[in-house]
Every structure is written in C-alpha cells, then in structure tokens.
Image (tube, grey):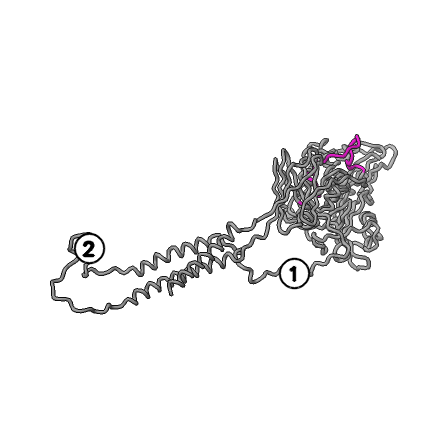
C-alpha cells in the first residue's frame, strides 16, 4: 500500500509542479499592450491628451519613430492647446471600447500679443519648432526615434512633432503594462516539491518494509550428510556469490541518489519566481493624502513647476551670458525685458565705447532655493525665483514673465538680497500665489504707489511724509545717502563756484510686480529712477566732464553750457504688510546701474 501512496504522491507532485511552471511560461498572460496612433499625414503636430494616456492603468511608454528629427514633449493640457490654438493639428481620443481615434483640429481666432508671430505674410498658418518652448515640463529629441517612459496625469498632454514644418513622424505607439501576476505559481511549485518529497519517502519506507517482512525461512527435512559444495568455484555461466561474501548495503546511497533529482526539480522550478507568483494575503494600503496643504477654493494652477522654473532660469542665464559676451542687445531682448533690459542696453553701449568698462552682473544658473509661481492659467504669467551662488554666498531674487503662449519667459526684475534678509512665509511652488492688482487696497500702500513713496524717502529722508511706512534701517538708503554726500563734497571743492549739483528720485516707468505671501502681505518689485543734475550758476559758466567717460559717452558731449543729467535705474524688492498691520515695509533686495546721461 505504501507503494500505491508513493506513486499517487509523485504523480500529484508532477502535476502541481508542471502546472506552476506552465503558469509562468506557456500560460503566462502578456506583460503589456500596445496601441498604434493613426495620425493625418498633412499635420505638423499631434496631441495625445492625458485622458488617452490614462485609458489603461500604469505607466505609459510613448514611442515615436520617423525619418529625421523626432520630437516629443509634455505639459499642461491647457498650455499645449494654447500653443497650438492658431494651427491645425491632430488630436488623439479614445472611445468606450479603448480604441484610439484621431481628429484634425482646425485653428480658431484668438487674441494674442502684437509681437506674436501667429500668421505669416501670405496669411497661411505659422510654422514653429516646439523644441525649447518654456511651456513644456520636459522634452525629448532624437534622430529617427524617441522612446519616453512616462507616468502622466489626466491634466497633462503630449505634443509630438518633427520640426514644426515637416509632418508628424510616421509611427506613434503607446504601451501600457498589464497585470500578469500568477499568484498560485509559487504555491503549486513549492507544494509539488513537498509532495514529491513525501512520495519519495513513502517509496523508501515501502522498500524497507518489504525487506524486513521477508524474515528467516522455515527449515525443511535434514539433508543427507554430504561434503559441502562451493558453487562459486563451479564452472559455467550460472555461478553465484559465495556464502562467505558479505552483501553490500545500498539503503543510504539510494536515499542520496533520490534526493538529488528532488532538490534539482524544486530549485529549478523556483528560479525566476517573484512576488507576482504568490497570493497577496496582506493587501497594501494606499497612503491617505495629507491634509496639511490647503489650496484656496477656485485658485488656478501654478504657472510653472520647480523643475520647469529651474530649466527656464538656466536658459535665460545662457542666453544673457552670450549677449553679454557679444554686447548684443537684440539677443538680450529675447530673454530680458523692462528695467533689466534697459540697464543691459546701456552697459553694452558703454562697453563698446570704453575698453575697460565692467560687464554687468551675470544671471545665475545656480539651483533655485525659492520658486513662487503665479497661480494663473492665462497670460501674461510670472514667477518669482531666488538663486544662491555657492561661490560668493550671494542670493539673487528675480521676476520672470511670459507674455503669451508663444513667447519665452523674460527676466524683468533682478536684485541682490541682503545678507541678513528674512523672507516672509511663502506658498509652496506646487500651489503658487496670486498676483495683486497695482491699485490693490489690501496692503499698507498700493503697489503702484510704492515706487513714488520710496523715491520721496530717498529724496527727503526722514522728513518725507512716507518715512514712517518704511524700516529706518535700510542698507540701500544708507548707501545712497553716503554716496550723494561724497559726490556733493567733491563737487563743492571743484565746481561749487560755477555750478550746482542736485539729487532727486522718481518712480520708474516699469509696472510694479506684487505677489501675495501667506501672511496676507506681498513681495513687491518696483523701479525707481535716481537723477543727478549739474547746472551752471551763470551764463558764462560751462560744465565740463573731465575724467567722466561714462556720462560723456552717453550724452555725446564733454561739455555743456546748460548742464548734464545722469539717471540711475534702481530695481527694488520689498515686503509690504497687509493693510491694518503695524509692521513696517521691509527692503528685501536691490540693484542699481546707470541708465542714461544727457545734456540739459
């Protein structure tokens, strides 16, 4: 009976191990599924929305194959659609059965900035290369093929193109992973191995039982006395082992030989088993979303992400560095605007005329310590960033603005933070903050009045009617006052008998930038002009610019009977408390550079 049970156990073990192995081989379900996107041949762009990418669970692998340059990028769906709003493109969709279809989207009239190139001279659609746009969160470019493993949400979309002129690359596919777990493969293989061991043990016990059950034979009648015959010495081919030769035991060796194939079968069956080959007895729990982040109701999405802002600032820094090297104002204008561009243009003029004139401060491309994007889906949109130079331990605060979907971000305000500056509490970059209107009454002073108020303080000092609004310990005010006094003392020693030197400050031309902080205050950037005026005191006097090549170059003259004026442009960042607060307006950072010189 032991042999019967041994055979049954071995047969069942073979079936179980075979079934377990078959689940991971011939019966294993596919690991992924791939859908090909059919795109119209005459469109230069194609969009794969997040709804299509998430029509199946799991990560998405997008493959784009074509001749020549292949481009793919992803960004917010609203941004992708805005960038393509003036051109014809193919949009992919998915039906209820999971079948992908493509629709050609025609452009609709949209309001754009005056300098945006949305139509060509002959009225045809523009051709724009999407590579390098500041709208994309990430982009991929290759020669002949692009493979992008992604995990995008439904609010993001992919744009596919070649160079904006040629049609979309010929083959676009999307691959999703499939659930191909075989949770019973492991138990079947292990259970079969155990059952095989039981079967082998039963077989060995059966053999042992048979041998023990033979016992001593019953004796018959006594034989007649004869001489013993040694059969081992007889001739013939039927000789047997002599009675005096001991029989060799094979029990231990049989067990060893039987254990070897058993171990080999089990080990070979378990090779390659993973967590998918076992049942999930303890289901994992998804972490609950944190309740510490509260997004204001109705607030729109932040203009940029942290990584996107870092890439934009790096591009701005590279372009401006090249413009500084070449003193190319046109190139600088592609990445600078407002007061930052104005002082750069003046610097280039001076450097072209004066050999040893100093270059302007570089735009840092160091890692951004702070990013505060505007929470806004439309345009223009902006973000504030702070970078720290590890070599000089100097922090730079910047404002960058994008005028429309087709424009690049340009640096409008730029200043150095004070060494001991404490920033107010800001919203995280994945939430962003709202911009305040120039005439907002929610601050102790409206943003569009801040520049004029501070200019009055620079001119009149503590006697200004606005002095009580600002902190008295102001490094910039102190440096301006000291510089004015030094220059006035020097002028009194040399030219006081023939002329006068006056100082004044006024609000600059640039619009203020004000972004909200968490304390209901705001960080406000403004532009202030400081003007020095030298005028003669009598009709016969002449003002000469001796040793002042800077003003001489900008004014185009080295002497004047009417006098000269020199204007400096100050870029200033303040923390302005909320209306009703007893806090003072705090200067966060500043930069100052000469803007123009002229003959009165």
Q: Which mark is residue 288?
A: 1
Q: Is residue 312 magenta?
A: no
Looking at the rendered structure, the secondary structure element under dot 1 is loop
Crowd tier of the residue under label 2, counting other residues whose Cα lies within 10 Å: few below 14, some 14–19, many 20 or above: few
Total tally of numbered discs in the picture:
2
User: Residue placed at 53% from the left, 51% from the top?
Assistant: 27
Q: Residue furthest right?
A: 539
Looking at the rendering, the stretch of residues picked out in magenta corresponds to 114-137
Location of mark 2 (residue):
239
Residue 2, position in %: x, y?
Answer: 38, 65
For marks 1 and 2, the one nearer the N-term is 2
Quarter of the image where one finds residue 510: top right
Looking at the rendered structure, the secondary structure element under dot 2 is loop
Judge by depth and name the residue closer to the eye, 544 or 333. 333
Judge by depth and name the residue closer to the eye, 16 or 93. 16
User: Residue placed at 20% from the left, 52% from the top?
Assistant: 237
Given contact means CB atoms under 8 Å apart, are the residues at marks 1 and 2 in contact?
no
Judge by depth and name the residue closer to the eye, 541 or 250. 250
- Looking at the image, residue 116 lies above or below residue 480: above
Tell which tag, 1 or 2, sits nearer the viewer: 2
Q: Quadrant of the C terminus?
A: top right
């Amino acid at each position: 009976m032991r042999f019967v049970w041994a055979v049954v156990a071995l047969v069942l073990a073979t079936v179980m191990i075979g079934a377990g192995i078959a689940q991971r081989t011939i019966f294993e379900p596919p690991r992924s599924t791939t859908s090909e996107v059919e795109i119209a041949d005459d469109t230069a762009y194609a969009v794969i929305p997040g709804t299509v990418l998430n029509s199946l669970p799991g990560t998405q692998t997008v493959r784009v194959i074509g001749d020549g340059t292949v481009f793919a990028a992803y960004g917010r769906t609203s941004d992708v659609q805005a960038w393509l709003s003036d051109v014809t493109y193919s949009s992919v969709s998915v039906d209820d059965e999971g079948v992908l279809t493509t629709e050609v989207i025609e452009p609709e009239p949209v309001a754009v900035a005056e300098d945006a190139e949305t139509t060509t001279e002959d009225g045809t659609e523009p051709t724009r290369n999407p590579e390098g746009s500041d709208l994309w969160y990430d982009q991929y470019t290759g020669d002949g093929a692009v493979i992008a493993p992604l995990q995008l949400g439904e609010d993001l979309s992919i744009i596919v193109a070649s160079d904006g002129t040629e049609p979309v690359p010929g083959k676009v596919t999307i691959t999703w992973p499939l659930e191909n777990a075989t949770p019973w493969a492991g138990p079947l293989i292990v259970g079969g191995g155990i059952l095989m061991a039981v079967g082998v043990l039963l077989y060995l016990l059966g053999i042992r039982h048979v041998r023990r059950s033979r016992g001593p034979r019953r004796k018959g009648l006594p034989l007649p006395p004869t001489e013993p015959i040694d059969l081992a010495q007889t001739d013939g081919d039927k000789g047997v082992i002599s009675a005096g030769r001991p029989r060799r035991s094979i029990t231990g060796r049989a067990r060893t030989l039987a254990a070897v194939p058993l171990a080999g079968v089990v080990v070979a069956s378990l090779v390659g088993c993973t967590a998918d080959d076992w049942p999930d007895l303890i289901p994992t729990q998804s972490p609950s979303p944190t309740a510490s982040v509260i997004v204001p109701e109705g607030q729109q999405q932040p203009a940029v992400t942290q990584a996107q802002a870092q890439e934009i600032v790096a591009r701005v820094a590279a372009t401006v560095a090249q413009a500084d090297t070449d003193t190319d104002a046109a190139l600088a204008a592609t990445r600078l605007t407002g007061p930052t561009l104005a002082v750069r243009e003046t610097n280039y003029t001076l450097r072209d005329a004066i050999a040893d004139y100093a270059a302007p401060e570089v735009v840092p491309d160091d890692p951004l310590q702070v990013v505060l994007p505007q929470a806004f889906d439309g345009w223009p949109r902006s973000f504030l960033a702070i970078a720290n130079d590890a070599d000089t331990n100097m922090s730079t605060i910047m404002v960058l603005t994008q005028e429309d979907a087709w424009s690049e971000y340009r640096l409008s305000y730029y200043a150095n933070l004070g060494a001991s500056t404490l920033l107010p509490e800001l919203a995280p970059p994945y939430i962003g903050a709202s911009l305040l209107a120039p005439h907002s009454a929610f601050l102790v002073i409206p943003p569009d009045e801040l520049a004029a108020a501070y200019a009055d303080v620079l001119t009149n000092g503590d006697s200004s009617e606005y002095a009580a609004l600002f902190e008295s310990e102001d490094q910039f005010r102190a440096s301006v006052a000291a510089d004015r006094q030094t220059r006035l003392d020097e002028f009194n020693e040399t030219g006081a008998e023939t002329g006068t030197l006056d100082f004044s400050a006024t609000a600059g031309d640039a619009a203020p930038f004000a972004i909200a902080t968490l304390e209901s205050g705001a960080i406000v950037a403004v532009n202030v002009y400081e003007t020095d005026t030298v005028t003669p005191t009598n009709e016969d006097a002449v003002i000469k610019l001796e040793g002042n090549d800077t003003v001489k170059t900008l004014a185009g003259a080295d002497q004047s009977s009417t006098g000269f004026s020199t204007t400096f442009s100050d870029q200033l960042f303040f923390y302005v408390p909320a209306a009703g607060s007893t806090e003072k307006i705090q200067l966060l950072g500043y930069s100052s550079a000469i803007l123009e010189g002229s003959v009165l």
